[in-house]
Amino acid sequence: MNKLFNRDLLWIIPAALGLAVPLSIISPGSFLASWIAFSLILLIGLLSLTAAWRWAGGGRSLAFMLVLALLLRLATGAALYLFLPTHGNDNPEDKAGYVFTDSYRRDGQAWELAQSDHPVWTAFSKEFYTDQYGGLLALCAWVYRYLSPAAHRPLLVVALAAFTATFGVPFFWKGAQKTGGDQVAIPAAWIFALYPESILQGSAQMREPFLITFIAMAFWGFIGWHASGRRKTLLWLAGGLAGMLLFSPAIALLTLIVLAGWLWFRKEQHRISWQALLLAAVVFLAGLFLLSWGLTRQASPISRSPLGVAAEWFRQAVKWDVYQLERGSGWVQKLFTEMGTPARLFFVTGYGMAQPVLPAIFIAPTTIVWRTLGILRALGWYLLAPLLIYGVYAAWKTPRQRERSLWIWLGVVAWSWILVSALRAGGDQWDNPRYRVILLVWQALFAGYGWACWREQHDGWLPRLLAVEGVFLVFFTAWYAGRYYQIFSPLPFWGMLGWIAVLSGLILSAGWLHDRWKLHKKPRA
């Protein structure tokens, strides 16, 4: 072990010192102070990733995955920091090199806290409004106070987010391997590591990369315990849940629900220890009260119970997002006048599920940086969504009852969260995908299972789903082109939806009839 560690240091130290140079050059303040701070984060990060890689036993495939995942996040963060001020929009966030308004405000407050005489833990008080629960604000303030007290260097937090996001890959790899073998783990891990929205979140000062990794840690802790009964793996579950409680108690509660469903649908005669039950109860109660406390930081509580506060906050948030969507778009206002209130909710949900809308990103006028970001994010979602849909079919066709129940449960989790994200963020093309990607662990696992099933069966349903998506993209591209450039008169919106529905129905019906015909012609044994 010592020989391996010494051998790793031979490349880790030069790599850390070398990668710190370009990050230090583009950061403000003294180059030497920047280089020392970045070198320290990079050194600790590379040591942690190398240890996790060896522990996971993924070999060259996992090593290549980790290197690519880390470099893409670091490079994206540095490129956005450099080019947004000159090639972005004319607003304070872009001029400062921030992709997200949330990260711009929170990072500014973190720097103020770091420069003040207040202890870092005051980030959890109601005085600081930019972080609902205070965990990320406290972390950013700690980094600035102790690693960069003389200058505000936002890329330090970007580097920390990039390493944290990449650190979750080995845990997810091991959990996926235990769940579905290499045939599921390999495609699922590639999705987990390289999904564009995850790369973007991991290259910014956002809480999503931390939450995704905490879920991956909890996933492995649960799977390791469930597969072998070793209680030591529960430490990873506890650590992941503790991290979620600091950054988003709602996600900790949701993770407990997902894992409880996993146990239920597997229906295995596996004795659950009192320690595990105690841990779940403590996390559930703590998460519920922290969630209620975090929500009441932003508004006066209407209900006294934690569940009542959460339910009322969600209802008001959906109502506000629908209003914002209607106010921000003239064509949405026109469509809303043509439909009743229930139909509006369905429209907002469907529109949110389509975000980021790929045709709109290609057609709508914007800067080169934002167009590139939008295309990559939309491509990632439009490639993942068919796999998630096909996964439902694959799960339903799974022959063994326990396995079928588990995969159907994971499909329900993945799609329920996609719907909740669409409702919570309406048609917003930034908040919606950001909420959606938090549960990337379950989405990537389910999509990986769908891909593995299709590779094994090579049936026609995945290509048919892609054809339906192609119809959607062609019609909406033409519609957006007509709206923005008046090259030709676009179809009426409802007429366009009708054509999409008819052609999609023909594709799917013809496919089903073709499969029935082939089955009928197949000679019986």
Image: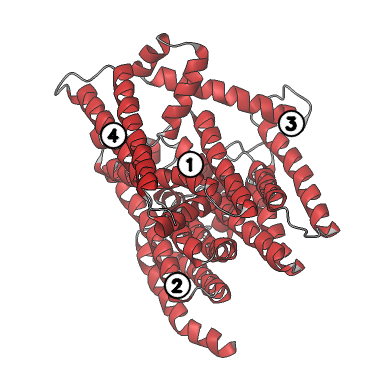
* 440 versus 492 height, above or below: below
Mark 4: which amino acid? Val
Mark 1: which amino acid? Arg
Mark 3: which amino acid? Leu
In 3D space, how far apart are the residues under numbered discs 3 and 2 (Cα atoms)? 43 Å
Label 1 packing within 10 angstroms: few (<14), some (14-19), many (20+): many
Label 2 packing within 10 angstroms: few (<14), some (14-19), many (20+): some
Q: Which residue occupies 26% across, 43% down?
A: 87
In the image, which disc is placed on residue 307?
Answer: 3
**Residue 66 location in percent, x, y?**
45, 67
Q: Is residue 126 left or right of residue 210?
A: right
Q: Quadrant of residue 374?
A: top left
In the image, which disc is placed on residue 471?
Answer: 4
Please state which of residues 370 and 107 is positioned toward the viewer in this rendering: 370
In the image, which disc is placed on residue 94?
Answer: none
Q: Is residue 74 left or right of residue 289?
A: left
**Residue 372 location in percent, x, y?**
28, 45
In 3D space, how far apart are the residues under numbered discs 3 and 4 (Cα atoms)? 42 Å
In the image, which disc is placed on residue 63?
Answer: 2
Among the two numbered marks 3 and 2 on one chain, the one whose residue lies closer to the N terminus: 2
**Residue 69 location in percent, x, y?**
42, 62
Among the two numbered marks 3 and 4 on one chain, the one whose residue lies closer to the N terminus: 3
In 3D space, how far apart are the residues under numbered discs 1 and 2 (Cα atoms)? 27 Å
In the image, which disc is placed on residue 434?
Answer: 1
Please state which of residues 302 and 226 is positioned toward the viewer in this rendering: 226
